[in-house]
Every structure is written in structure tokens, then in C-alpha cells.
Amino acid sequence: MNITIKDIARVTNVSPATVSRVLNNVGGYNEATRKKVLQAAAELGYRRNESARSLVKNSSNLIGVIMPQVSTLFYGDIMTGIERAAHQSGYSIIISHSGNVGDKIPECIKLMAERKVDGLIIATVEINDEHLAMVQELRIPYLLLATRMPDRNVPYLKVNDFDAAYTATHHLIENGHEKIGLVGLSLTDRVAGTTRFEGYKRALEDNGLKFDPHLVKEGDYGFYSGQRAMQSYLQEKTELTAVFCVSDDVALGVISVAADHGIQIPDDLSVVGYDNTIIAEMSIPPLTSIDQPFMEMGEEGCSMVIDAIRHKQKIYSKIMPYTLVERRSVKQITHKIF
């Protein structure tokens, strides 16, 4: 038997219109009425017909999320935050993967159009003008999360990568390091790559240290990038005492090769990571890392999109705070180590 709003109204002696307002959280009733209606709905086993409701409201109650198809730990935290905010507001989430380098973004956007999502979040992947035009054709609120379009006025939510990279590098300099490597970034990535590179470089310059391009090892932000970089340092017999890694995954790659060659962290080499994922705590030794509040970013970003849907308001870009979490992977030195 399908329980309807009229059934709840009959049991509670409340008008169907008031029952509808309570169930849709619209307002216009007192707290006692709200509790009575919700209790009756639960006891009767009322289930809202979302399909019919969507037709009436011209709304799917869906938030679309597009993110890369890569196994990086922080994506779980981002999604936890997004889902928490969505469910608290009565929305559901549909996720589409853009491929490792964003090559499937057009397909993802087409899927979101077919599913008639009410809002869209594009997380950690860089989009181009073609993608942006497709998104704007949807005529729904959208937000870039942990990414941005540097040359376009597109709303985003992220940390300041330049400042965070500066902070990480400066921390190593404060501990006596002068030969500092930069590992794992892509210099063609204008979102996280060039900004972290510039932050690293500026920290060196501000402290009177000469920038050495041979200390920069590019990669794809992953574990194997860290391994390849460390192997390259060893093969080239590079003089350095510390490395700033652009992700915790990269840092673990560096540490694994260092361990294979009897290089102790931090006695022989200091390491700073980026993201402060769970592996930063699990690393041996525990890893000093830049903390990005991914769960809070997911929650805040989703809330921004939902507010824009409900109140038909513009989304404004926002910078989230970061912190340097100090653990045991950095040593204060007075001379070159290896």
C-alpha cells in the first residue's frame, strides 16, 4: 500500500498542504506540528516519490561530480564531504570519471546533461574553454573544486598552492637546508604544477638561495614519480639534503628508494609532502606535510552549489586555509648530508 500525504493528514488532523510543507522543509508551521507529521510519516512508512516530485519541481535533486579516474587517497575525503553536504540537504550524487588526464570530460558533461543534474562540481581536473562552454550550456550552478581556470572568471574552491609550496620550502630552509629538490609535479599543469613550482622558487630566492633547475624532477604526482626522481638524484650524484614533494604519494616513492639505498629519513635526507593524507601518518617516519582540508572542501563546495540552486545566486570563488603539519621527516642540519 502506498502511503500518501492525505493519509498522513488524516492521521494527524493536519491539512495536506501543511503536511507537504513539513515533508519538503518549506516552513510555515510550528515545531509541534513538524514533529507530529514526521512521526506519523515514519510510523506509516511514507516514502516520497522523488520522480514525481522532480517533475513537479523541474528538478532532479542530483548534484553531478566529475573527477579523474586515479587512485589517490584524498579523493575519498573529497567525496565524503560532498556526500555529507548533499544528503543533509536532500540531494543525491552522481559521479562520472574524466579519465586520468581529463580526456573523457566531454562524455562526462553529456552524461550530466542527460541526467538533468541540478548542479555540477568538477574536482581536481583542469578544464579547457571547450569544456567550459559545454558546462555553461547546461545553465546550472557549477564549481571547480581543488582546481581552477587561471585565465577565466570561473568559480572555484581551493587552497593557495603558491603560498602552500612557499611554506613547505621555507620550512626546510628554516631547518638549515639549502640544496632542496622539488619532486613529482607537471610543469604543464597550470593549476597545481606551475603554482607550486613558483612558490618553491620564490622561497629560495627570498632566502638568498640560488635556484638550480637540476633539482626539479617532473612527474604525475604519483608514487612512481617519486621513485624515478630519487633514482635520478642518485644516478646523477646530486648534492641535496631535502626534497619537497608535491604529494604524499610522491614522498613515499622518494622514501622507498631512499630505504633501498640505505639513506635514512630524516638523518640523511629530509622530506616534506603535500596533501596530508592518511599515508603521511603511516609513513616511516611519519611525514611532515601540507594539509589540504579535503573533506571540508568537499562539504563547503557542495553547500555552495546547493545554495546557488536554491536561492538562484551567483557562486563566488573561495580560498580554503592550509596548514603545515610537522612530524618526523625533517631534520635541522648545518651541512650537506649526501
Image (tube, rainbow, N blue to C red):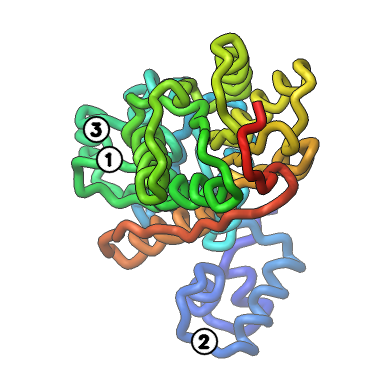
Q: Is residue 296 left or right of residue 213?
A: right
Residue depicted at 57% across the width and 29% down the height = 240
Label 2 – label 1 distance at C-alpha: 45 Å
Which disc, if any, is residue 149?
1
Kindly identify which residue carries mark 3: 134
Q: Mark 1: few, some, or many residues within 10 Å (few <14, many ≥20)?
A: some
Which disc, if any, is residue 29?
2
Q: Is residue 338 left or right of residue 99?
A: right
Dot 3: element: helix
Measured as percent of width and height from the top left, residue 248 is found at 62, 36
Q: Do the residues labelled 1 and 3 touch (CB within 8 Å)?
A: no
Which disc, if any, is residue 158?
none
Q: Nearer the viewer, residue 43 or 328?
A: 328
Dot 2: element: loop
Q: Amino acid under label 2?
A: Tyr
Precedes in sequence: disc 3 or disc 2? 2
